[in-house]
């Protein structure tokens, strides 16, 4: 897997321990490279184990979004999955190759590090789902359970207390992701900061685009679209 990544990584981003001309695959001296460009350090501390778990979480959300889209086939579920996918592809296929900045010493990843995709996705998704949750707030509370309300892919009305719990839990789940990338030495502070700023900008642009589409196609709400492939279930709310 490491060798395959090296084939697409610019030479300027390859770490000093990696020798692309060696007959045997180079071994990372800092730990193990996990899928998703995550470094599991040798003899990890409790903080580093927590950082690995936080680094995996954005991918878990991506699989959840894919599952929900396959089950519901709604435009709401498609919107969140498309946003996460767009942020990932923009970073990995375009921006990282333009900036061409290597990762800090201590990482087992071979790809470029600026900006951090983990940071972009975590920050951007957090901004989008909080904006959406605030739009779903109702004045006199909701009869839905907190567990059901926490799934942001569902348009569950949120009372004040449920909204507060929603925000606290999702902030706790996503906001530490950029710091986790620094703890694992997979990104520098500058790389996660750039990723976070990019995520916020993309979240604003995406929310604006979604609102325009919701208004434009509100007459199709709860109706099949794209020849029945999807159901338009993403209502406009303010």
Image (spheres, rainbow, N blue to C red):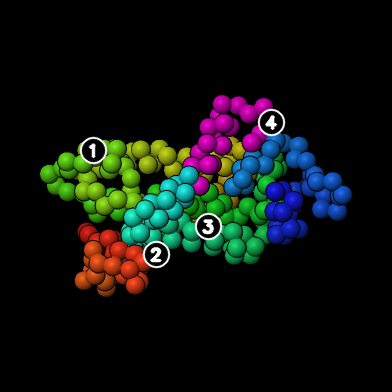
- Residue at 22% from the left image edge and 59% from the top image edge: 237
Q: Along the line of sight, which residue is nearer the eye, 49 or 205?
A: 49
Q: Quadrant of residue 76?
A: bottom left
Q: Which residue is mark 2?
A: 205
In the rendered image, which quarter contains the C terminus? bottom left
Q: Which mark is residue 177?
A: none
Mark nearer the N terminus (3 vs 1): 3
Q: Give how far across and how far down residue 184 sits, in percent.
A: 61, 38
Q: Residues within 10 Å of mark 1 (few under 14, many from 20)?
A: few
Q: Give how far across and how far down residue 152 sits, in percent.
A: 33, 48
- Residue at 42% from the left image edge and 39% from the top image edge: 173
User: Is 116 on the left or on the right of 24, as rendered?
Assistant: left
Q: Residues within 10 Å of mark 3 (few under 14, many from 20)?
A: some
Q: Mark 1 or mark 2: which is in front?
A: 1
Q: Mark 3 or mark 1: which is in front?
A: 1
Q: Give me the C-alpha separation between circle 2 and circle 3.
A: 16 Å
Q: Mark 4 or mark 1: which is in front?
A: 1
Q: Which residue is mark 3?
A: 88
Q: Along the line of sight, which residue is nearer the eye, 42 or 60?
A: 60
| Residue 128 in view in this figure | no
Q: Which residue is mark 4?
A: 42
Q: Give how far across and how far down residue 174 sits, in percent.
A: 44, 43
């Amino acid at each position: 897997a490491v060798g395959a990544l090296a084939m697409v990584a610019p030479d300027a981003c390859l770490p000093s321990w990696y020798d692309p001309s060696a007959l045997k695959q180079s071994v990372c001296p800092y730990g193990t490279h996990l899928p998703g460009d995550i470094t599991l350090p040798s003899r990890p501390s409790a903080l580093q184990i927590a950082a690995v778990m936080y680094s995996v979480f954005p991918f878990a959300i991506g699989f959840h979004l894919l599952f929900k889209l396959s089950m519901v086939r709604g435009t709401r579920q498609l919107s969140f999955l498309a946003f996460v996918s767009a942020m990932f592809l923009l970073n990995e296929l375009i921006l990282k190759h333009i900036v061409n900045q290597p990762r800090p010493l201590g990482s087992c990843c071979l790809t470029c590090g600026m900006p951090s995709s983990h940071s972009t996705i975590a920050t951007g998704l957090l901004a989008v789902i909080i904006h959406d949750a605030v739009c779903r707030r109702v004045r006199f509370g909701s009869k839905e359970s907190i567990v059901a309300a926490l799934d942001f892919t569902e348009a569950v009305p949120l009372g004040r207390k449920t909204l507060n719990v929603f925000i606290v839990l999702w902030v706790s789940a996503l906001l530490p992701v950029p710091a986790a990338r620094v703890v694992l030495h997979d990104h520098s502070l500058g790389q996660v900061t750039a990723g976070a700023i990019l995520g916020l900008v993309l979240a604003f642009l995406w929310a604006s685009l979604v609102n325009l589409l919701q208004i434009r196609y509100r007459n199709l709400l709860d109706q099949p679209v794209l020849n029945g492939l999807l159901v338009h279930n993403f209502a406009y709310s303010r």
